[in-house]
Amino acid sequence: MASLLGRFCRKLVVPGSAHGSRMISTTACDSEAVKSLNLYSAINQALHIALETDPRSYVFGEDVGFGGVFRCTTGLAERFGKNRVFNTPLCEQGIVGFGIGLAAMGNRAVVEIQFADYIYPAFDQIVNEAAKFRYRSGNQFNCGGLTIRAPYGAVGHGGHYHSQSPEAFFCHVPGIKVVIPRSPREAKGLLLSSIRDPNPVVFFEPKWLYRQAVEEVPEHDYMIPLSQAEVIREGNDITLVGWGAQLTVMEQACLDAEKEGISCELIDLKTLLPWDKETVEASVKKTGRLLISHEAPVTGGFGAEISATILERCFLKLEAPVSRVCGLDTPFPLVFEPFYMPTKNKASSSSSLSSPLKKKHYLIMGLHVWCRYWMQSSPLLITSHSICFFR
Amino acid sequence: MAQHLKSSSKSILLNILRHNIGFSSPSHASRHLRHNLPHGPLTTRLSPNPITRYCNTMVDTLSSIGSHEDTNSQVMDFPGGKVAFTPEIHFISESNEERVPCYRVLDDNGQQLTNSQFVPVSKEIAVKMYSDMVTLQMMDNIFYEAQRQGRLSFYATAFGEEAINIASAAALSPDDVIFPQYREPGVLLWRGFTLQEFANQCFGNKSDYGKGRQMPVHYGSNKLNYFTVSATIATQLPNAVGAAYSLKMDEKDACAVTFFGDGGSSEGDFHAALNFAAVMEAPVLFICRNNGWAISTPTSDQFRSDGVVVKGRAYGIRSIRVDGNDALAMYSAVHEAREMAIREHRPILIEALTYRVGHHSTSDDSTRYRSADEIEWWNKARNPLSRFRTWVESNGWWSDEAESDLRSKIKKEMLEAIRVAEKTEKPNLNHMFSDVYDVPPLNLREQELLVRQAIKSHPQDYPSDVPL
């Protein structure tokens, strides 16, 4: 229940406030003007800036004209006119197909899909047109100006069709990028990068955080680079990787683990395709353990890709199997949502964070190592086992 | 067909006058009424004032409201506008009593119909049109044979559809952007794509603009405003609408044109695109090549409407049915449609009736599902080339000598193009990895290294004609 309460009551706290380990921030410096914004306002700001800075940019989708069902497009139609910000018919394949055509003519088309659950009619356009537009033409054409935004993820009461996390489907498509921000400040910078990136981008916004997350967001035009993961919490014992709203859950798990004396390194992947393997690899080589967490069902989820890659690259450094703490292999349920979700306690009790090795067993192993060193004077044996205590 | 026209030509002419060469639209769209038009080439132009097209489609302006004498009739407001009520339970029939008539200028033998309206075509244009139709046919023949000989992996011909290909292209401007399906190489040919360029793509050599990535006939040319072919059916339709919207916003004197077949009109993207085009008021031409077959599926298994032309009205789109094997009719219809699309910011649907004389592709043997006699009849009796040739010759613009000169020239050029394309080397291996994104990401750079290592270890697994 703690995790549920956590979801409903807490706000996402600004990096830098006193919550255990220092969080690394790579965005604006303190002296610039900032405003306390929630996620949908930050996204709204990004869209205002995008339309302001490029006269050949457009924002459209279902209900976008009055501000959108999540208010992300508030004020845009009034400010930039109905020719640039407009409602479309209720037809995702048309919305994305139309957006591809606009982008193919050198415009920026920021397309909204009302819920990620409804993106599938557009899947053909995304996979067979958008993703291949540049490649199949020999770079004569491209639709890099296309950005598809969609709210994704659990919201507490969304059920099958207002809670899905479909990122894994898109991560399997060479030619597009998949970006998922974790917070308002990140969302604004990442969205501006996505819009301006010369490749088609699918941008999933954690709808749970639209109102729940409040953060100091710089008012100016800034971009956060794509395909660069961020270590948002440094640690030595285990690496945790996630994206979007799940990071707030994982952060809680990190805090709990810290009370047990486990130092956790938390990484926000931000861009899932192409993803920053180097940052995760460097971290796991340091910690020796990896836990991946996402809301999407575990089977075939993007965690599998991260797990397989890290296994290939860090096998000899791994002290435990890679853990995936994910949604279950069921359609997203309503009444059973609390059971379905990858909570912080599920993370805490996962095998990575809770090694089967008991403290005394480890001491014996440590003694064994020490004896061997004494006999063979080989420093290598010591460095292959770092001193950690696990429950 | 010619009989029918002669006997009811007067009523057809009236229809034409009322509906502007047969584009079906609400009767009160009187701005396009042409009074006292002479027979023969069209001489009047459209009204110079841009029209607010909403007037045509807003239900509010229906003149029938208020004119009912029946006191039981009422008019009420609903979202979407006023609508007259009726006490009768009446279902609109699933089809009109008669099929939508088909606009043509030439009869089956290539004689100009006496009451036909058409946009005049100069000698230069007519000769180029006919020559390009011949070129297209010969190119298709020779490439098809090359595939049969094993020199090409695949090919798809446009036999029977040469008039649609060439005449539509001739009626457009080079600035109009094309979103093809895959049976419209004639549009590229008209615009200047050379036989060598066609051959390069078919052989996937290093001169292919597509860099060897796709199967033959998947042409694309940004300098000729022809978007690269993708094999997925009808996906190009909504793209064309977006491109048209861009042209409108940029105030270009150009439209988007997209082609698709009878089969393509069943795809969801067709419906999405037409609806979007109407709502967005996009200057786009939807040209349907209704050639009777979607591989082996005849139109009777494809839809139960009166073809594709009637679907336009369902979306609020002005539409016309044309004889796709009549080069002059195609030219006129596309010419007029283009003007309307650009001036009025509206989509137009053109259903060009034709027949797919060739097989669907080299992977198909259509005699398995249709009679060889049927194919032969269309090839001979309803051939678009012979009809147009008759008309061109009747103007004194063509001859047998010109024909044989052209054919021998094309044959020579084609064989040379194939010879050169075949021996030109393939694109470099690094082009497998470029253009997936604007810049290759790390994972692709790594994979290229892995592939190159694999080639070093097992060279026999890999073709030797791809330069490394």
Image (tube, coloured by chain):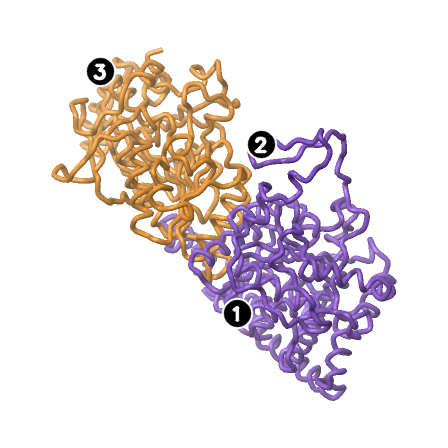
Chain colours: A orange, B purple
Q: Which is in the foreground here, disc 2 or disc 1?
A: 2
Under mark 1, the amino acid is Pro
Which of these two is toward me, A262 or B159?
B159
Q: Which mark is on residue B174?
A: 1
Q: Residue at x 72, y 61 (%)?
A: B16
Q: Quick check: A187 above or below A211?
A: below
Location of residue A63 in the rendering, given as x and y in whole percent from the top left corner: 45, 35
- Counting from the top left corner in percent of width and height, residue A268 is at 30, 33
Q: Quadrant of the N terminus of chain A?
A: top left
Q: Which residue is mark 2?
A: B77
Q: Chain of mark 2?
A: B
Callout 1: chain: B
Mark 3 lies on residue: A259
Whether residue B172 can be seen here: yes
Q: State whether residue B290 is above or below residue B48.
A: above
Amino acid at the residue labelled 3: Lys
Identity of the residue furthest to the left in this view = A31
Marks 2/3: CA distance? Answer: 67 Å
> What whole-number distance in Å separates the C-alpha atoms at marks 3 and 1?
71 Å
- Residue depth check, mark 3 versus mark 1: number of the one nearer the observer: 1
Query: Which percent across, then down, holds residue A2?
Result: 32, 12
Taking depth in this image into account, of B416 and B70 the one nearest to the observer is B70
Q: Nearer the viewer, residue B386 or A177?
A: B386
Up-down: is A206 above or below B286? above
The spot of residue A15 in percent (x, y) is: 20, 29
Label 2 neighbourhood size at 10 Å, few (<14), some (14-19), many (20+)? Answer: few
**Callout 3: helix, strand or loop?**
helix
Are the numbered discs 2 and 3 placed on the same chain, yes or no?
no
Looking at the image, do the residues carrying marks 3 and 1 touch, with CB atoms under 8 Å apart? no
Q: Which mark is residue B4?
A: none
